[in-house]
């Protein structure tokens, strides 16, 4: 083993599965894996990716949707692990469990803390049109995302980045940053530093209604929303009483005599007049149909040009 310290790993999604794989490949001593219960899709029980890796690597795994029960606390204490790593588990960690690990519980957070604490840092980064993003390797604390920082790194956001691409970049960077600093932390060669709570900002929980496009906003801000909500809930409007997602778009900082929310042709391109600037949809998805490019959409819905979107 690269390091004989026993580690408990918490995680359930693709991002946590990738990190678990890298930890195993780096020869860390993963004593136990805690993951969410595998969900049923119709009649089929869909196995989460973390369980698959655990079984392939012959590591003990336990499914727990909540960690507040006494059984969970006893299980973790009995491992005698002095460190845990948690990523994308999706539930609050009770203080009793936080106190179970002498070296704490390490987490990857996709923002430059204390900026954008909370559940939607990547979406909020894109919504605000930030030029830079980053990751923080931190220790969990009772207050959400407020624990001391082990390491941080920032990157420049590409103009083409949406939630999917930026999220992948940040968690890939976070995995490397954690593994590069893990031995140093275990061996007390890194000095953690507290966050400045006075500088903290918060990324709120995203709801489906947040995806509704307000055409009285600027084209630039609407395009930021399209990028931020690429995975979910999508940025959407209504056409012919059906929900229409705009999956990908570009914007032009120019105005016309057209009404706000009116669809028209601008230099042979489909454009929508916003309060300030033009939004040019490239890929759309109408309710009940697959994503298609805007020209194919127009072939099926010729009345789209000239409409005033709801």
Image: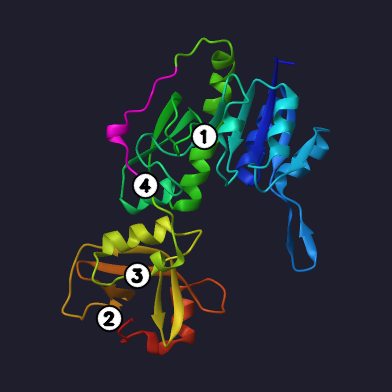
Outermost residue toward the left in this view: 257
Position of residue 252 in the picture relative to residue 109 (left or right): left
The majority secondary structure of the magenta stretch comes to loop
**Helix, strand or loop under label 2:** loop
Q: Residues within 10 Å of mark 2 (few under 14, many from 20)?
A: some
The image quadrant where one finds the N terminus is top right
Report the span colored magenta: 192-202
Please say if the residues under marks 2 and 4 sit with CB atoms less than 8 Å apart.
Answer: no
Q: In the image, which disc is placed on residue 30?
A: none
Picture quadrant where residue 240 is located: bottom left
Residue to which mark 1 is pinned? 108
Quadrant where the C terminus is found in the figure: bottom left
- Is 58 on the left-hand or right-hand side of 274? right
N-term-proximal mark, 1 vs 3? 1
Q: Residue furthest front?
A: 70
Q: Secondary structure at mark 3?
A: loop
Q: Residue at coordinates 18% horizontally, 70% vertically from top-left?
A: 255
Residue beneath disc 3: 213
- Whichever of callouts 2 and 1 sits on the residue coming sooner in the sequence is 1
Mark 2 = which residue?
Answer: 262
Q: Is residue 186 above or below residue 45?
A: above
Q: Which residue is mark 4?
A: 125
């Amino acid at each position: 083993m690269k390091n004989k310290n026993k580690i408990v790993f918490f995680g359930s999604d693709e991002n946590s599965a990738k990190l678990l794989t890298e930890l195993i490949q780096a020869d860390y001593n993963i004593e136990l894996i805690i993951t969410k219960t595998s969900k049923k899709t119709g009649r089929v029980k869909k196995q989460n990716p973390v369980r698959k890796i655990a079984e392939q690597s012959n590591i003990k795994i336990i499914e727990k949707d909540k960690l507040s029960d006494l059984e969970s606390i006893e299980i973790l204490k009995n491992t005698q692990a002095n460190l845990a790593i948690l990523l994308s588990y999706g539930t609050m960690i009770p203080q009793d469990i936080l106190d179970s690990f002498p070296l704490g519980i390490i987490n990857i957070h996709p923002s430059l803390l204390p900026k954008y604490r909370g559940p939607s840092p990547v979406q909020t980064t894109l919504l605000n049109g930030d030029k830079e993003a980053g990751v923080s390797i931190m220790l969990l604390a009772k207050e959400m995302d407020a624990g001391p920082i082990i390491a941080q790194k920032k990157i420049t956001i590409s103009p083409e980045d949406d939630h999917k691409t930026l999220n992948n970049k940040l968690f890939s960077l976070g995995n490397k940053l954690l593994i590069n600093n893990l031995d140093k932390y275990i061996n007390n060669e890194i000095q953690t530093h507290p966050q400045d709570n006075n500088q903290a900002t918060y990324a709120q929980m995203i709801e489906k209604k947040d995806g509704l496009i307000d055409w009285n906003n600027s084209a630039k801000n609407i395009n930021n929303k399209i990028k931020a909500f690429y995975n979910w809930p999508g940025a959407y409007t209504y056409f012919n009483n059906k929900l229409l997602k705009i999956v990908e778009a570009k914007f032009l900082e120019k105005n016309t005599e057209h009404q706000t929310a009116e669809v028209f042709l601008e230099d042979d391109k489909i454009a929508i007049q916003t309060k300030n600037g033009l939004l040019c949809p490239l890929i759309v998805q109408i309710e009940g149909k697959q994503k298609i490019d805007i020209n194919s959409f127009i072939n099926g819905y010729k009345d789209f040009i000239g409409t005033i979107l709801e």
